[in-house]
Amino acid sequence: MTHLDPKAVFVPCVLLLWCFTLVISIAGDYEILLRVKNAQIDDPHGNLHDWVPNKDHNPCNWTGITCDPKQLAVISINLSGFGIFGGFPSGFCRIHTLQNLSLASNNINGTLSSESLSLCSHLQLLSLSNNLLVGRLPEFPPEFSQLQVLDLSLNNFSGDIPDSFGRFPALKVLTLSSNLLSGQIPAFLGNLSELTRFELAINPFKPGPLPPEIGNLTKLENLFVPTANLVGSIPESIGNLVLLKNLDLSDNDLSGRIPESIGGLRSVEQIELFGNQLSGELPESFANLSALTNLDLSLNRLTGKLPNKIAAMSIGSLNLNDNFFEGEIPESLASNPNLWELKLFNNSFSGTLPENLGQNSDLENFDVSTNKFTGELPKYLCFRKKLQNIIAFDNRFSGNLPSTLSECSSLAYVRIQNNELSGEVPVNFWGLPLLYFLQMDGNRFRGSVSPSISSARNLSTLLISGNNFSGEFPNSICRLHELVTLQVSRNQFSGDIPFCITELKKLQKLRMEENLFSGKIPSSVSSWTDLTELNLSRNQLSGEIPPGLGDLPVLNYLDISGNSITGEIPVELTKLKLNQFNLSDNKLYGKVPSGFDQDLFVSSLLGNPNLCSPDLKPIPPCQKSKRESFYALIVLSICVVLLLASSLCYFRTKSNAFGGKSKKLHKVTTFQRIGFNEEDVISSLTDENIIGSGGSGRVYRVNLKTGQTVAVKKLWEGCRKPDTESIFRSEVDTLGRIRHGNIVKLLFSCSGEECRILGFEFMENGSLGDALHDERSVSLLDWPKRFTIAVGAAQGLAYLHHDCVPAIVHRDVKSNNILLDEEFRARVADFGLAKTLQLDAEVAEGHCVMSRVAGSYGYIAPEYAYTLKVTEKSDVYSFGVVLLELITGKWPTDSSFGDNMDIVKWVTEAALSSSQVEKDGVCGFKDLDRIVDPMMNPSEWDYREIEKVMHVALLCTSAFPINRPSMRRVVELLLKDAKLSCSK
Ligand SMILES: *[C@@H]1O[C@H](CO)[C@@H](O)[C@H](O)[C@H]1NC(C)=O
Ligand SMILES: *[C@@H]1O[C@H](CO)[C@@H](O)[C@H](O)[C@H]1NC(C)=O
């Protein structure tokens, strides 16, 4: 027997015990992970498929798990972007060796409570960024002494930043950007003395200052607080941040001067202060910022000159746009070796640019537009062959285009319009290979366009109108297959228009007016499938109008006036849906095609002495030859016989279809290509197809033979006078030409002695009024849909008010006149007719059903009672009522409002007057839920938007028209995150 050394026993025993505890510990982690996976995590994509029991009870090889190799313990769980669902899986924190827990970019929902966090106090990193968490930020228990990274950005956390956020002794990174935090930025965050990165951007904080305590964070390298409602001035203490590399306070409301102390930011590389209200001159201390490479101060109210010292700094990107800078640009700017971007637009800089700008640095972007610069464009802009953009429009640059630019092969985008540039454009400049946008209109360039332009293969826009260019236009233009817009108007180009120009398939706009072009209009135009605008007016063109123009599917602007065009007007042209049409002052002859036989077109036809028309007054009537009259007589007699025969048959079968009287459709106008047949339509106007009935007529649903469904409105009859007919027609004509995504399209109309019908697109989801007030459909209208409808309808009305010439006042805006297509997009309907129809009503006798009041009860603006005038602002009022209807889900004259109350009074008085709270110029409503439609069940985010829409509605329904915003402004207010003050 050998004697056992006690040490020899003890050491292995201890080792064994140690191994044993390790195994126990890793086995414990394994159990915890499996339990959390099963109980707390929903993993629909199976990303945790390898988290399954194994015989070693070892999780270290599982996806997302990192173990400490020595201790055999889980130290990190990273499930970022795994698409997992469920609440915060706090069970992971039971692994007491866990240091890092990252669950970013998943669908973790619910709230984050202090209780669920209490297990996690040993963590060093916690990232829950980009999840679906809501509610207040939790107080972190004081045990979180090791936390270094806390990332809760991109969630829907709301409310204040809790006090405990000022008590993390080790925190280096705090990221709360893109939440719904609404308190002020607290001063106690200045206690986080270890912070290197601090991000609070994009939160609806209550307007407040950037706390001066920020200057205590002397280890800070990144300070990122754009779009956080910062007001007041930038604190002096900012200058203490000597390690700061990135400073971004853009898009706030900071005001006052940039503090002199900014010169203390010795390490700063990037300063973004754009979009504030900063004023005054730039501090001299800027010159100390030797590491600065990007400086963006655009969109402020800074004044003064660009200091020489700043110009001499080695800044790479300098943006000073949209300020009030004046004075000259210092020469030293050009010696800066790093400058790659120079943006000075929308200031009042004057004088000349430094001559050697671009010679010493790789300049790529150059934008000095809208200033008062004079002198020549700098020669060396493209010296390093890196220049991509030259933007210099709206200045007083003069002299030649620098010849060096013709070797600038990197150049892609040039806008130098509205200067005083002159001379010939260098031959090779036209053909720069990467050039896709060339705008130089409104200068004094002369000479010809070089055939070398064919090398500019990417060119999509060429705008050279209003210069003194001359000579023939080169055929090589036809090789530029990307060309979309070509405008060469108001020059002295002569010779033929290149015939091959019709090969440019992508061309949308071709304007060549006011030149000396001669010869014929290119005739084989069928490739121009995208062409919307063709203006060849005031040239010396001859020959006939190519009939093919009438087949172009989207041409809506055709002007060939002021030439010597001969021949008859091709009847094909009547197929076009024209906004602008001019054939005047040519040598056209023959009969005006019946499609143009309308007063609207008279001015487009004048100045063609040999045109004739049976109807149009100023144009002479057509002389019929005897032969023609003879044939016409025979044809007419046959027609009469046939007509009599057929109408006899017709009345036998349908003697009572229209109240016993014979009805003929006259003047059929089709605005869209649809298979439309009058008979089809008439025979479908039966009671069983009625889908609605209103002030102006009944609406029927009609299925055309083509399978298309249309809504046909048959206007009330019986109250009309012959001379209102032409008003009706010209108005219908306007409507037919309106193209807007939020306005119902008029497809066709017929009008005649006794019948007027209008054919519209059929709208799958009926009217907003029905959808909103019908229990069966209202559940489909959640807040986001309602908001989209509000914006859509506003855009439609804004189009009528601001983009139509003359402006169209709707006169009957109400929820029943806002239709919803299959995707619940709003389409404004029934506009413009109110006026015509009202005229009719005034002359009515007997059974006329229309009231004289323009508009519908509950939607009519108060001033109508005494002015009896309807303006755009009355539409705005009615639209405001529709907004209130969307929010409350109640009819404007709901009986629950009580005596003499309508929705506007109810909302403003009963529900809001006592609960509107104004703080720092921003208005909120305390108990909005009293009036919000309970059917919507809105989310917290929805409430913010509802609040905004409520503000807009109250503005729109203000008693005085002058206080109501324009529809265009309404659209802006709805779309912007606008801050409004309380309406009084
Ligand atoms: C982990 O995987 C590696 C390679 O896939 C393998 O060699 C190793 O044995 C595995 N370890 C455990 C504990 O399963
Ligand atoms: C979280 O999401 C799950 C599944 O998507 C859902 O069942 C649960 O109700 C949600 N919880 C909360 C609090 O919203």
Image: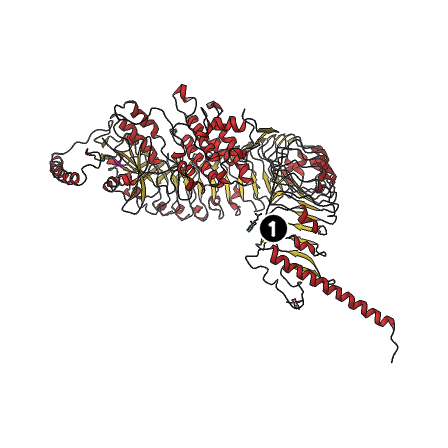
Magenta stretch: give its range: 660-668
Task: Say whether residue 553 is visible.
Answer: yes
Which residue: 32% across, 31% down? 696
* Residue 663 on the magenta segment: yes
Q: Going by the image, does 515 lie left or right of 545?
A: right
**Residue 491 placed where, x, y %?**
40, 35
Question: Few, some or many C-alpha atoms within 10 Å of disc 1 (few <14, some 14-19, many ≥20)?
Answer: some
Q: Name the residue under label 1.
A: 87
**Residue 98 placed where, x, y %?**
70, 56
Magenta stretch: helix, strand or loop mostly: loop
Q: Is mark 1 within 8 Å of ligand 2?
A: yes
Task: Say whether residue 425 is visible.
Answer: no
Which residue: 44% across, 35% down? 795
Closest to the observer: 870 or 12? 12
Closest to the observer: 762 or 815? 815
Closest to the observer: 712 or 294? 712
Q: Going by the image, does 393 lie left or right of 865?
A: right
Residue 975 versus residue 13 in the image, above or below: above
Closest to the observer: 4 or 476? 4
Residue type at mark 1? Gly
Residue 728 versus residue 272 in the image, above or below: above
**Residue 806 placed where, x, y %?**
37, 28
User: Which image quadrant for residue 496?
Assistant: top left
